[in-house]
Structures are given as C-alpha cells and as structure tokens.
Amino acid sequence: MIKKICDVSEGHLFYTTEGRRKPLADFSGEVQIHEEQELVSILGCIHKGTKKLYARILLCNDIKYKTDTNIYDYMCFDALGTVNDRPVVFSGLTLVDSDPENNTLSFEINDKALIEKILKCS
C-alpha cells in the first residue's frame, strides 16, 4: 500500500566509480513511500503483525543523461533533489528497475531515517 507520494524536482543523479563521484543525469520524479503489514497467527487467531516501511524514488520521463555510461545494478548511486521545497540528499540508492521505453529509472531508498523525515514533512 502506498502511504505517501512526494514530488522531487531539480534532481541530480550521481554514481560512484573508482572512488570518484560522477554526474549521471538530471531528473524530476517522485518518492513513493510504501507500507506493508504482515498478519500473524497467534494461537489460531489472526493479529496485526509487523509493519515494513520502504521507499522508492522513481525518476520520470524527463531524465537528461550527462554521460553515456552503462547503468548496472551493482553500482553505487546518490541523488540530490528538492522535496516539498526542501533540499534532500538520497545516498546509497539501489537500482530496482530500468525502463528504457518509458525513460524511467527506479531506485530503492535504504535510509530509514530519511524515509521517516519525508513522511513527517507535508
């Protein structure tokens, strides 16, 4: 279930190789915060269980690449962007999906504190 969607503007995507941070693309997109809840059976009765909170940043149609570097899932990615008129640094992003037909990239945000911060700001 999607809990919150926030727009990202003025985004800059970077990748790290050989110890150097290099620009990869400029973008706009959105952050989707998802919440999943597992139901747990306790003594034969179904109860609410654990909640899992995770977020994805989706880079949308207006990606402007600054290099012709191939993108691989083992690369380290970082992004800077503006969410709700506040600058945000997305570090340690993990590539989830690449769709060249729609010109979109999807990354998982691994920083739980950042996810909580985005949830709190309106």
Image: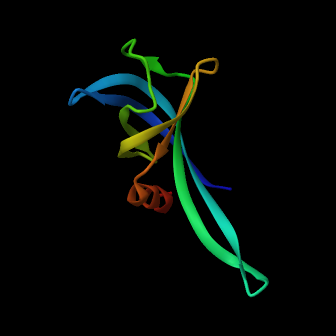
Q: Residue at x 39, y 60 (%)?
A: 113
Q: How many marks?
A: 0
Whole-percent x, y for residue 75 in the image? 38, 31
Q: Quadrant of residue 51?
A: bottom right
In the rendered view, would you say 88 is above or below 19? below
Q: Residue at x 39, y 38 (%)?
A: 81
Q: Residue furthest right?
A: 44
Q: Quadrant of residue 65?
A: top left
Q: Residue furthest bottom?
A: 43
Whole-percent x, y for residue 73 in the image? 46, 31
Whole-percent x, y for residue 98 in the image? 56, 27
Question: Front-most of 92 and 27?
Answer: 92
Whole-percent x, y for residue 8 in the image? 48, 39
Q: How is the image coloured?
A: rainbow
**Left or right of residue 80: residue 43:** right
Question: Front-most of 122 and 16?
Answer: 16
**Left or right of residue 100: residue 12:** left
Q: Residue at x 45, y 40 (%)?
A: 94
Q: Residue at x 43, y 58 (%)?
A: 112
Q: Quadrant of residue 85?
A: top left
Q: Residue furthest top?
A: 68
Pick the quarter of the image with the N terminus: bottom right
Question: Front-most of 42 and 69?
Answer: 42
